[in-house]
Image (cartoon, rainbow, N blue to C red):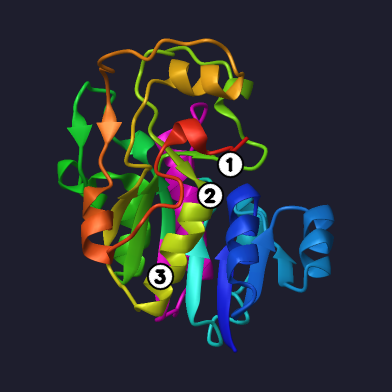
Amino acid sequence: MKKIGIIGCGWLGSRIAEKLSGDYQIYATTTSEEKREDLERRGYHPLVVDFNDETYVELLSPWDVIGELDTIIITVPFSSKKENEDEIVKRAERVALWMQGFRGQVFLMSSTGVYPDDAKDFSENDLAAEEVVKEKIIKKAFPQTNILRLGGLMGDDRFLSKYTVSDPGAPANHIHYEDVGSVIEKMIKEQTHSELYNLVAPLHPSKREVISIQKKSPYIPEETVKGKTVSSEKLISELDFNFKFPDPRYFHPG
């Protein structure tokens, strides 16, 4: 059975692991002993590693299973609104150092938040990986890296209606976690390398409409929704991929 490493096995990583665990042995990192025990109960091979702690990471040698893994999926959150670029750089460099010597397939989970908040439709050609600091660092260390720029992650316990939304009239650029897992599974089987894809549901209703449907509130759909949208056309075309959840209004059936 082939082996997959998931660096940063949190909300998304654990769901990707569940998707792939029937066909692959899962090795994973997490940030706490409690999470490690949970992953171990699921039959994975977990390890506690905190890439935010510079001193802690410097004491580590490269991952001891690095030579056994066929694929590594990086789901470490590299940035938040409170962080500066220097902190992002350090975290990405620590991850790259810990993967040192790996020659297999690599996936980096990035975000459509890297695109400007302009009212246009963005494709991968609008922003190269070399212009995004976390993508640039991982790509330089591992040129074979597939970069997936994910829309807002939804599904399961994540409902847009649970969040404070400052721009309800803006288009929804969201992705269901099941489609993320399916894309990765397909790319692993096809041994895809060095690609950059936006991973966003192809339909973009307004956030207001998504929230209204989730709350089962009366709503009259807007004729036109203006604002930033991110295109997944390259992914659909090149991978011949069909979204299970193409419409953010219906990520939560029933």
**Callout 2 secondary element:** helix
Residue under numbered circle 2 = 177
Q: Which residues are magenta?
A: 78-107
> Looking at this view, is 38 or 221 the one in front?
221
Where does the C terminus fall, quadrant-wise?
Answer: top right
Q: Which mark is residue 133?
A: none
Q: Is residue 59 visible?
A: no
Residue under numbered circle 3 = 186
Where does the N terminus fall, quadrant-wise?
Answer: bottom right
Residue 143: x and y in percent read 29, 69
**Among the two numbered marks 2 and 1 on one chain, the one whose residue lies closer to the N terminus:** 1
- 125 relative position to 40: left or right: left
Residue 196: x and y in percent read 27, 57
**x 60%, y 54%: residue:** 51
Residue under numbered circle 1 = 155
**x 57%, y 13%: residue:** 217
Residue 70: x and y in percent read 49, 82
Q: CA distance from mark 3 to mark 2?
A: 14 Å
The verdict on residue 88 being magenta is yes
Do residues under tags 1 and 3 come within 8 Å of each other at their CB atoms? no
Q: Is residue 179 visible?
A: yes
